[in-house]
Amino acid sequence: MKKLTKILMGLAVVFGLGFAFNSVAYAADPALDSITISPVSAKLQLAPGTTTDGNFKVTNSGTSNLTFKVYATPFYVNNNDYENLQFSGELNRTQIARWITFDQEEYTLAPNATAQIAYHVNVPASVPAGGQYAAIMAESVIAQSDDGVNASSRVGMLVFSSIAGTTIEKGAFLGSNIDKWYKTSPVQTSVDIQNTGNTDFAVNTTLRVYNIFGVEIYNSGLKTNQVLPETSRSISLDWNSDMRIGFYTIKQSVQFLDNAEKTYKQFVLLMPVWILVIMVAVVIAIVALLIIKLQNSKTAKKPAARRAPAKKPAAKKGRK
């Protein structure tokens, strides 16, 4: 369980940093980049009918006073790419957003000051076992400008929680996606994983690339991604090849839950379309030249037609 928690925290760092870097902004203002939150994730083990306490820090890294508010929102994904995290609309697995409360909901910080903020998760007595997911937001409050435009920025800490009870960790491998011909860089591949359980689990992946001689020229290293319950995820495994033209073998390695590691290989070609067009044009030109040369050779070897001998003029008859 400790190992899974570390993996979850690592994933949450990626999610959290990505979320922090995509702040919501409605107008240009220096204060928009002055708010930071730590940690960027929390992993909680909860039980029905209990209260769990936690805390996080918000820092004003700007040069002027910053007022911000804190609140909880649902956290979920609505597509297989997990590219756009969703923070509105409640699902069965985001009820925890309603269970989170704060001692204080609005703060003002001086420049370079940090506030430690307490939160409480009040779990109802009758809740289903399994994963629950939310985000705790810290959103700056910017006074309305002279032109009537408001501006704000927010950062979030993702909350991964598991409710005690019957936990089902179950998933399926849906497929590997590797093209046979790549016309542009980067080389994009993916694996599709489905979570049919009631709690999130980690998927470990590695991408390796070998040249035509079997020498490894790229290794992505071990990467970990989380798959939330009742969702499917397409996990990207890309190679920024700088368009090295040639033939290569791409190998994907995938492991999740207690399943043995699976590997998938594909022999691929890296070549831009314009190079293929030039090659085809060159081949056509060579073939055309050979045909012309062959025709000229046949013409040169053909014997000239013989002229018929000239007829001798008939002898004139003499006079008697």
Image (spheres, rainbow, N blue to C red):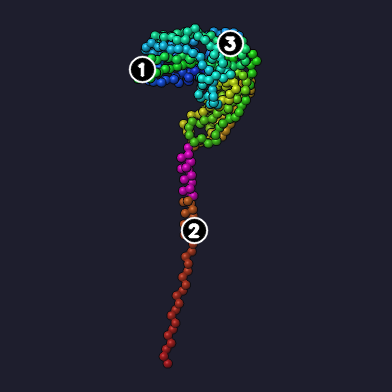
**SS at badge 3:** loop
Mark with earlier residue (1, 2): 1
Q: Position of 318 compared to 255: left or right?
A: left
Q: Residues within 10 Å of mark 2 (few under 14, many from 20)?
A: few
> Looking at the image, which is closer to me, 84 or 209?
84
Mark with earlier residue (2, 3): 3
Q: CA distance from mark 2 to mark 3?
A: 94 Å
Please say whether residue 283 is one of the residues in the magenta stretch.
Answer: yes
Please say whether residue 176 is one of the residues in the magenta stretch.
Answer: no
Mark with earlier residue (3, 1): 3
Residue 44, visible in the rendered structure: yes
Q: Quadrant of the N terminus?
A: top right
- Give the residues in magenta: 272-287
What residue did someone put label 3 on? Answer: 123
Task: Find residue 318 and report its horizontal and vertical position in percent.
Answer: 42, 89
Q: Residues within 10 Å of mark 3 (few under 14, many from 20)?
A: many
Task: Find residue 42 and report its horizontal and vertical position in percent.
Answer: 53, 13
At label 2, the amino acid type is Lys
What residue did someone put label 2 on? Answer: 298
> Looking at the image, which is closer to me, 228 or 76?
76
